[in-house]
Image (cartoon, rainbow, N blue to C red):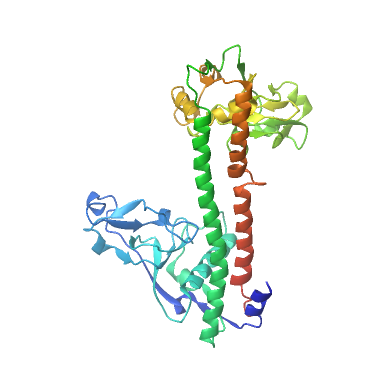
Amino acid sequence: MSYLDSLLEGVQVEWKNLEDVAKFRRGSFPQPYGKTEWYDGEGAMPFVQVVDVGFDMQLVENTKNKISKIAQPKSVFVPKGTIIVTLQGSIGRVAVTQYDCYVDRTLAIFEYYLIEINEKYFAYQLEEKFRIERINAPGSTIKTITKAAFSKFKIPIPCPNYPEKSLKIQKEIVRVLDTFTELVTELTTELTARKKQYNYYREQLLTFDEREVKHLPMGDKSLGEFIRGGGLQKKDFTDSGVGCIHYGQIYTHYGTYTNKTKSFVSEEFAKKARIAKNGDLVIATTSENDEDLCKAVAWLGNEDIAVSSDACFYRHNLDPKYVAYFFQTEQFHKQKRSFITGAKVRRVNASNLEKFKIPVPSPEEQERIVTILDKFDTLTTSISEGLPKEIDLRKKQYEYYREMLLTFPKPE
């Protein structure tokens, strides 16, 4: 901090219009868009559209479309290392291209600069200006920005009369911010790898030879029963009282298990509600997509809770976490696909869940499996101690330094 303070101490800043700093032009693509000969084929190159620009100053690894050799002369070639910015749709995404490509007309391409400036510093400033623009924009989002408005963006140039010192400051700002973005990228890559590892071990640990371990229908009387939720809607929520789980919260708020609820209902309402107990598995039986359908959370709290309609709960004599992990496996989802009904709204009935087969190893084996998977679950999903927490902390750290290093006082 003392080093950064001394770096920026007493620094004079000149605010220049973007049009006085760099020249840009729009990309292009031959019309009509859907003509098949414009795409793929021998010699096809990546074609960058808004959807291909990430939030980490990089393009996706593989663009959604490629542009054919026939179409390339009618587009705009962009060499590796060029700054591009989205100006329509999800505007203000900035990238430094990491491969040669062609670019769509919804993006601006910076081809040359009118003053000496660190290009990555310029990219960070563009990103920051659009961030502020989005905060101050009326309504929820900005869909497009005109060339005239974009050209008037103010870019701060430290020490404008001393180019050598100015570039040194810019380079140091870039170094600090790159450190955090690279760290977040590394942590995110690590998280992706750990999730794959988690999925692999979960499948392996919950797969048993049917000759060695019984596979029973979940509705078998020796295992448990499914009980439908009912009557609970969001309008019934209260600030305190009896805990409750609404089906929509299962795939937006909860993980594999929980011992506290996000919402509550009054004690009077709870008397007529469907009540789940400690160890029950609460399952969303309705969703708008197949992936979230039948997502489940094990209730491990000591108090009874209310469960909404479009959900059910499984009362059983298995390890609660073991059953919750089983609901995440491919062998469960494979069975689920056979019973999905509905078009826009997808459903699986509780009566059909009774037919799903689950491997039933010994209680000791269930506990062993849960102990292993709990470690992966904490590492990959916990916002209090796992990689997600570390990523969140680094993002906050980056935001702090970004604000400090990119925001210069404007002259009154």
Viewer-side residue, 256 vs 14:
256
In the figure, residue 85 lies in which quadrant? bottom left
Q: Is residue 341 above or below residue 389?
A: above
Q: What residue is rendered at 60% in x and 62% in y?
A: 398
Q: What residue is rendered at 62% in x and 66% in y?
A: 401
Viewer-side residue, 129 vs 59:
59
Q: Is residue 60 above or below residue 405?
A: above
Residue 14 image offset from top left, x and y in percent: 56, 82
Residue 233 image offset from top left, x and y in percent: 65, 30
Q: Is residue 342 above or below residue 162?
A: above
Query: Is residue 43 shown to the viewer in this render?
Result: yes
Quadrant location, the N terminus: bottom right
Residue 159 image offset from top left, x and y in percent: 57, 84
Residue 355 image offset from top left, x and y in percent: 51, 16
Query: Is residue 157 shown to the viewer in this render?
Result: no
Q: What residue is rendered at 61% in x and 83% in y?
A: 12
Quadrant location, the C terminus: bottom right
In the figure, residue 274 lies in which quadrant? top right
Q: Name, please, the residue furthest toward the bottom.
A: 161
